[in-house]
Image (spheres, rainbow, N blue to C red):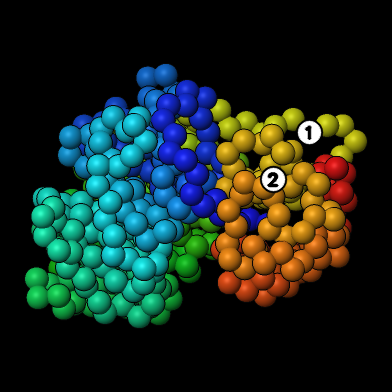
Amino acid sequence: MLALLLALPAAAQDQGAVHGGPVRALAVAPGGGALASAGFDQSVIFWDLASGRARAVVRWHAGAVNALVALPGGGLASGGEDGRIAIWPADPRAGEPLRVLDGHDAPVAGLAWHDGVLASAAWDGTVRLWREGAAPRVLEGHRGNVNAVVFRADGVPVSAGFDGTLRAWRQDGTADVLAEFGLPRNALAALPDGGLAVGGVDGAVHVLTPDGAVREVFSGSRPIAALAANAAGTLLAAAGLGGSVAVIGLPEGRLLRTLDGPGTPVWSAAFDTDGRTLWTGGADRRVRRWDAVAGRALGPVGDAGEPALREGLDPHGARVFRACSACHALSAEGGNMAGPHLHGLFGRRMGSVAGYTYSERLARGDIVWTPESVADLFTRGPDVVTPGTKMPVQRVENAEDLAALLRFLEQATR
């Protein structure tokens, strides 16, 4: 039920824009004052922070946009599920990138910039270094997906991957394994003193000091999805799938405070240039602003408020549906969302919403959605029921929650 949007026509200005799915990436302009966000809805939104509204929205990638990095001069690079990297100008309202970098044959998961070189990490197991006018350097060594890449303070590219390793890449294309954690590492942040911060699926955040020492500075119960350090290297933000953000003081590595949002996964984080304003994005589709020093919420940008539900709908089911509402509208007029609308769900053949480009598996249309087939989807999981789908793996394991969700869908999708 959570298939990702594929290509839509490029769009330009949209003053009332919000994301139609989880916010997967954020980037702050080097000089401050400008912010971009990207998400599962395949959109990149360029925000006017003075008004708190979008100055431009571009929909160009054929799939989710997983990574952003700010470039000198106000430009931006975006990397997507389609394996492509787009270079955007400071004024992106024409809707077309300046350049397109092709080479990865799997989703791009991370981007970094240093001294004229763009680094990309992808699920094809490679890191690529792109310099204008030259062929990309392909760095191979990780076993499986590469989830993050940064440039260390000395300009050395460092990557983290599904294989649990942290690798620093030499000029000859070989790598030094800086650390092995045994479990996948999802997030990286470069520290100004030459150190690194790395977070993984085990909920742990480690700091690697410039002399190679490794120490744990945070341990949570849910996977870490994003890390961000301020320019002074005094604050480290660790965003997790549990719905909160840990603010860690450096160099001592002490938890200063926890920023609690709506309780849904937080996928992205970025510090503004003032060193204390933190931007986060997550499954609630909002870009949120925090005072990380005071631990105070400063409010979201845009307007991603939940649509009002009509009376008489199952309240328990409505609560369970919140996890689905990040990507799916209940009505056919739900706007730009990461997944197809659910109006008329029961009795509808899988992959049949007009105008929506489905993954190959869902496009087969060999399942009719009924209470029984939806229950099967969330009991065994989409990876089992529809193998090869782009839908995130999710299950509703509580029988009462599942029954309430089905009641709600029967009522709300008519």
User: Horizontal placement of 70 versus 182: left or right?
Assistant: left
Residue at the (39%, 67%) spot, across then down: 106
> Under tag 2, what secondary structure?
loop
Indicate the position of residue 208 as horizontal and vertical percent values: 25, 65
Which class describes the residues within 10 Å of circle 2: few (<14), some (14-19), or many (20+)?
Answer: many
Residue at mark 2 to residue at mark 1: CA–CA distance: 15 Å
Residue at which label 1 appears: 309
Quadrant of the image occupied by residue 270: top left
| Residue located 56% across and 28% down the image | 303
Residue 289 image point, x, y percent:
44, 33
Residue 65, image x, y percentages: 43, 50
Name the quadrant of the N terminus.
Answer: bottom right
Q: Quadrant of residue 31?
A: top left
Task: Return the mark for residue 186.
Answer: none
* 239 is higher (above) or lower (below) than 222: above
Closer to the N terminus: mark 2 or mark 1? 1
In the rendered image, which residue does mark 2 sit on? 341
Evaluate if marks 2 and 1 touch, with contact meaning CB atoms under 8 Å apart.
no
Which quarter of the rendering shows the C terminus? top right
